[in-house]
Amino acid sequence: MGNIITPGQGVLYMKVGTHAQESLEDIIKRKTQEIEQTGYGLWGYGGSTCHPQTMVQPFAKGYARQGGRIYLAMEPMESKHFAEPIRADELSIDGLHWVAIPKVINVRGSRYALVIKDLRREEFKLPLDRTAVALGNSLGVPGGKYISGRVDKACLTISDNDDHRGPARTVQIGLIAEIVEPYAVFVRNRIPSSQGPAEPVDAGS
């Protein structure tokens, strides 16, 4: 996939781990099989950041217009996510018009999903001090300051600025994929669960 730590490159950073009672290893295996069967996979997530329509889609479309690509860079972590592993059966690009999700693709316990291909293990350090939030209310905020507390994912742009005070902040990436059109979607069950999808730690599902 090449070196994505180049100035101007767009990266969607996300922490990943156990999700909807399924281990990260099992999720990776399942997503790899789904991509082999369909050419793409849906990597489920939740939370209040990286909204499909207001964040991920415009972020990715901006790069696509210039002939660029957006990569999903994932930092594996220990997590406990006990949401019911209920499969979403519909997806929507705009939250209004819904279509059925192919039977071979399973998104569980999630509200949104990234559309990905070329999922692979790749080990490298992502220098958050050399990134900045790409859009939204926090536009331009350094990634090292933005990623903290419950903020565990962000649309970032790699910069060529190495200036920072104190120790450089890096995160260890262990998994990577390319985000492809339509980039991010809403997912749902036609018959909602009484509990609904949980918000906290995100991972493929």
Image (cartoon, rainbow, N blue to C red):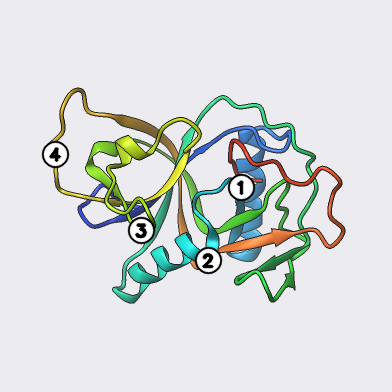
Q: Earlier in the sequence, mark 3 or mark 1?
A: 1
Image quadrant assignment for residue 122: top left
Q: Earlier in the sequence, mark 3 or mark 4?
A: 3
Q: Does the residue at mark 2 contact the one at mark 3 (Cβ under 8 Å)? A: no
Number of other residues with Cα within 10 Å of mark 1, as a class: few under 14, some 14 to 19, many 20 or more: many
> Which label sits in the foreground, 3 or 1?
3
Image position, residue 81 (x, y; %): 68, 32
Query: Label 1 belongs to which residue?
Result: 46
Q: Report how far apart the C-alphas of labels 3 and 1 lie in the structure.
A: 19 Å
Q: Report how far apart the C-alphas of labels 1 and 2 lie in the structure.
A: 13 Å
Q: Report how far apart the C-alphas of labels 2 and 3 lie in the structure.
A: 12 Å
- Disc 4 is placed on an element classified as loop
Give the residue displayed 59% in from the left and 36% down from the top: 201
Mark number for residue 162? 4
Residue 70 visible: yes
Q: Report how far apart the C-alphas of labels 2 and 4 lie in the structure.
A: 32 Å
Q: Amino acid at mark 1?
A: Gly
> Which label sits in the foreground, 2 or 4?
2
